[in-house]
Amino acid sequence: MLQDARVIRYYQRITDTLVDYWHKGYRTDELRLYLEGYITSMRHSGAVESYLINQLEQETLRFLYDSSNFVVAQPEVETDYY
């Protein structure tokens, strides 16, 4: 569970981008590559502590492999009772 405010902002930014890219047609393998690049750049920049980056990576991978995060909500059809 993420508790650091900066890491939570990174998580939100990454997951929003993953969903956006999914809707643009990218699929799981491509999204995973994007995530790996993002995490690698964070490690090289030293923006956050290493253990926090590991937690961020675990949480975002969990998000990525949960297919319910990429389902588009369909409105329910209302039946007319008149």
Image (cartoon, rainbow, N blue to C red):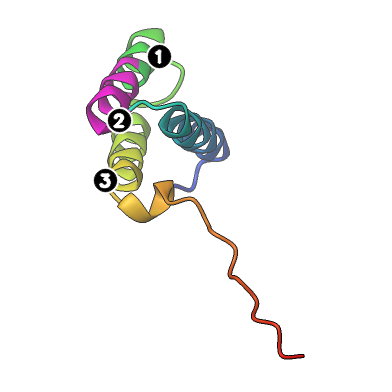
Mark 1: secondary structure: loop
The kind of secondary structure the magenta stretch mainly shows is: helix
Observer-nearest of 18 and 82: 82
Task: Measure the C-alpha gap from mark 1 to mark 2.
Answer: 29 Å
Q: Quadrant of residue 61?
A: top left
Provide the residue span drawn in magenta.
27-37
- Is 67 inside the magenta-drawn segment? no
Which of labels 1 and 3 is toward the front?
A: 3
Residue 66 as seen in the image, left or right of residue 12 = left
Residue at the image point whose x is 60% and y is 71% from the top: 77
Task: Measure the C-alpha gap from mark 2 to mark 3.
Answer: 11 Å
Q: Which residue is mark 3?
A: 65
Q: Residues at badges 1 and 2 in contact (C-beta under 8 Å)? A: no
Q: Residues within 10 Å of mark 1 (few under 14, many from 20)?
A: few
Observer-nearest of 14 and 70: 70
Q: Amino acid at mark 1?
A: Gly
Q: Quadrant of the C terminus?
A: bottom right
Q: Which residue is mark 2?
A: 27
**Residue 81 seen in the figure:** yes
Residue 80 as seen in the image, left or right of residue 51 = right
Which of labels 1 and 2 is toward the front?
A: 2
Query: Does label 2 or label 3 sit earlier along the sequence?
Result: 2
Q: Amino acid at mark 2?
A: Arg
Q: Which residue is mark 1?
A: 46
Residue at the image point whose x is 70% and y is 83% from the top: 80
Residue 73 as seen in the image, left or right of residue 70 = right
Residue at the image point whose x is 32% and y is 40% from the top: 55
Residue at the image point whose x is 39% and y is 27% from the top: 25
Observer-nearest of 24 and 82: 82
